[in-house]
Structure formats: structure tokens, C-alpha cells
Image: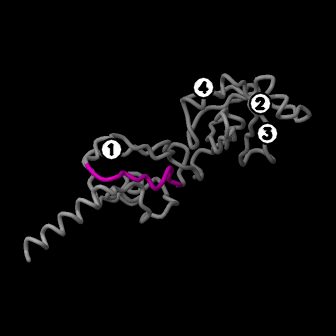
Amino acid sequence: MTTLKVQRRNMETKAKKLRREGYVTGNLFGKEFEGSIPLQIEKGEADRIQRECMKGSQLYLELEGTTYDVLIKELDFNALDHQILEMDFQALVKGEKVHSVAEVILHNKEKVPEGILEQHLEEIAYKATPENLVEKIEIDCTGMHIGDVLTVGDLAIAKDGKVDIQTSLDAPVVSVVAGRNDTVEDEEEAAAEETAEA
């Protein structure tokens, strides 16, 4: 599992100044802490975590000689350049379920032969113990056709008894709908059939 080294942040130093000095701000919270611990993270390390992990990822956080098993709870980005600004972590407790999200990743989108592939959900909310956390849900779209709909209840994670799904099981995750050209062709075919029958 990935390890991230962080430092306790001096709250007298403003976040803007820290960012100019090459740091990203953050917070660590959990049941074992009163409130939260303010953090500062070297920009290079934060960028590495951004590349390797995502919201809902589990990793080890090293702070002042202590290693914490944590969940990435929130990632805050600059809207203009998508640079990471802040990272929030939740300390995990063994055997205790925690709220998290799993990112939905679609594969082989180009192998859908017709229609338009629509992704309705970017992530699935759930609760699980630290050892059963799910970082991402990968869906193979090969062979999906117009009219096909994959719901949360169709996913393997929904059938995992160790995971409590918080998103509606009936919610569509991905579907294939007729594109404008497909609709026009269908209408033309229907009109041609009616003419032939007449």
C-alpha cells in the first residue's frame, strides 16, 4: 500500500504562503483525535499521490513517527489548472465500517458498435471495514447495445455481502442510447416498412 509522509502544519502560516513555498495543505481526522490535525504535504509528494490514488483510496500516512491507516476523504483542486490544493484524510479503525466512494471506470467504450454510451454515475457510495474498501469499479463496455442499461444492483460490489451500498441499487451507472443518426435511420426503416405494407 502507498505511504505518504506529511508534517504537522503551523496554523500561524497562511495556506497561500505554504503553497508558494511548495506545500499542499491537508487535515487528518478520526475517532482517536479531538477535532482534526492540520497537515502540510510537500507538493511533489501530493502530486505523486494524485497520480497513484484517488478519492476513496486507502494508504498509510506517516506523521511525526506514527503511521496511520487512512482513507482519502477529499481532494480539492484549483479549477483553472487542476493543481492539488488540499487533501483530507480519515484515520481508519480496524473492524469499523467507514463511508467511502468507489470511482466508476469504463473500459472499451470504443467497442460499443452503435448508439451513444452515457455514464450516469462517476462514483458509488458505500460503507465497509478498512480491509474491505473498494477503490474503483471497472466496467467492460464491450458488446453493449442500444437499450442496454447497467444499474448499481448489477455490479459485483452490490452482491458483496461485506459492503453496504449507499447509492440506490436501481440507479443507472451506464447505458447506451440511440444517437440522432440511429433515430433517423430507425424512422426511415419504419416508414419504408409501412410503405411496403401499403
In the image, residue 136 above or below residue 59: below
Question: Which residue in the protein does label 3 denote?
Answer: 37
Which residue is located at x 13 percent, y 73 percent?
A: 194
**Label 4 to label 1: alpha-carbon separation:** 27 Å
Q: Amino acid at mark 2?
A: Gln
Number of marks drawn: 4
Question: Which residue in the protein does label 2 denote?
Answer: 40
Residue 93 magenta-highlighted: no
The magenta stretch is 114-125
Question: Nearer the observer, disc 2 or disc 1?
Answer: 1
Which residue is located at x 45 percent, y 56 percent?
A: 120
Residue 32 placement, left or right of 181: right
Indicate which disc, 4 or 1, sits on the residue closer to the N terminus. Answer: 4
Q: Which secondary structure, mark 4?
A: helix
Question: Which residue in the protein does label 1 denote?
Answer: 140
**Label 2 to label 1: alpha-carbon separation:** 39 Å
Residue 118 placement, left or right of 22: left
Q: Amino acid at mark 1?
A: Asp
User: How is the protein colored in the picture?
Assistant: one colour
Q: Nearer the viewer, residue 30 or 108?
A: 108
**Label 3 to label 4: alpha-carbon separation:** 22 Å
Q: Amino acid at mark 3?
A: Ile
Q: Position of residue 181 (x, y in %)?
A: 30, 55
Q: Which quadrant of the rendered structure holds the N terminus?
A: top right
**Label 4 to label 2: alpha-carbon separation:** 15 Å
Question: Which residue in the protein does label 4 denote?
Answer: 48
Question: Nearer the observer, disc 3 or disc 2?
Answer: 2
Q: Which secondary structure, mark 2?
A: strand
